[in-house]
Amino acid sequence: MVRVRSSLAELPAYVPGRKAPGAAALASNESPYGLLPGVAGRLAELAGGVSRYPDMGATALVRAIAAHHGVEPDRIAVGAGSSEVCGQLLHSVVGPGDEVVFGWRSFEAYPILTAVAGGTAVKIPLRDHTLDLDAMAAAVTGRTRLVFVCNPNNPTSTAVGERALRDFADRVPQDVLIVVDEAYREYADPERVPDALGLLGDRPNVVVLRTFSKAYALAGLRVGYCVAPMEIAAQVRKTQVPFSVSALAQEAAVVALGECPEVARRAALTVAEREGTALRLRALGFEVPQSQANFVWLPLAGDSADFARHCLDGKVVVRPFLGEGVRVTIGLPEENDAFLALAATWRG
Ligand SMILES: Cc1ncc(COP(=O)(O)O)c(C=O)c1O
């Protein structure tokens, strides 16, 4: 009998948001607006070339990302989605038994990827649905190698502010890597939520993680990246699965980066829809924490499964976290209206 690693045996598998035929897909935090205008044409042009390997160094994409952020290309490492980059970061610094600290609940890939890397997850409970950075800093020990700060936090949608993030970074020793995961950055209010690259980007132990899966509408192509100190980026590149970012993904991301004004326009539409949705949910009596992302969080505790089932019966797929709450992605206006009508009739 083949022996599997005991640390993986008890690990829950990643639960993707469901898709149901004919139902609004509000379970996976995707963009509802489809591909950015220039992307589909470029993909069609390139499709014939996929019998060849992609550019392993993703040279054009790395250059475009570096220019976008105003940093040297040496500071960029890419992967097949920021999920892969999370894994690459862990593999770069975590050895057997090393500790990885993160808030909980947060992005569900963190504990999985931590265990796969051989590390030990240290989960710090949220306070008021928000990362408790004080408690997270206090949980850092001599065995801690990496801390994930998901800002805004998935699935609770809240964000930490500038002072809290800077104080946190000041408290964490410089030999511990701080990974600020900004997958939802484009939906956050820049007045209230710091851009970690601007705030902490000059520190030797801070890495900022971004993705093309959300506001850039490329979830299906799998491309994400980090901006890191040069030496760390070099390690992260070594841990990438060779050629994991396809040629189509690289080129689509370059085109998408060139369409920032359209990305910002769509994000603003989502933010406006989010605020209207939250307002109407609160008027219905739901607790809705202030979201800085493209989804809202309903802390329904023991009612979460029942609420999600009610929505599914009404052809809207949301994402329940059993016993905790329900995450609802902001979709097209008509999808959000369909969801709100169901929220209004729940137990109605
Ligand atoms: C906080 C956070 N980080 C990273 C990701 C990973 O996204 P991807 O691998 O598609 O880039 C997600 C996806 O849901 C997320 O919510």
Image: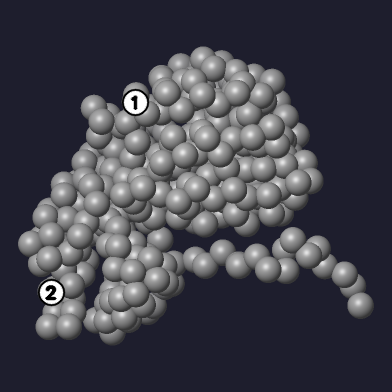
Residue 244 percent across, percent down from the top left:
67, 47
Question: Which label was assigned to residue 162?
Answer: 1
Which of the 4 image quadrants contains residue 255? top left
Instruction: Report the residue at 29% width, 68% height from top.
Output: 300
Instruction: Answer with left or right where residue 276 lies relative to residue 248.
Output: left
What SS does tag 2 mark?
A: helix
Quadrant placement of the C terminus = bottom left
Instruction: Answer with left or right where residue 50 lies relative to residue 279.
Output: right
Local crowd size for mark 2, using a 10 Å CA cut-off: few (<14), some (14–19), many (≥20): some
Q: Residue type at mark 2?
A: Ala
Residue 60 percent across, percent down from the top left:
57, 28
Q: How far apart are labels 1 and 2 at the CA level?
A: 36 Å
- Position of residue 259 relative to residue 13, above or below, is above
Residue 56 in view here: no
Residue in the foreground of this view, choosing between 149 and 57: 149
Which residue carries the number 2 mark? 344
- Position of residue 70 relative to residue 64, above or below, is above
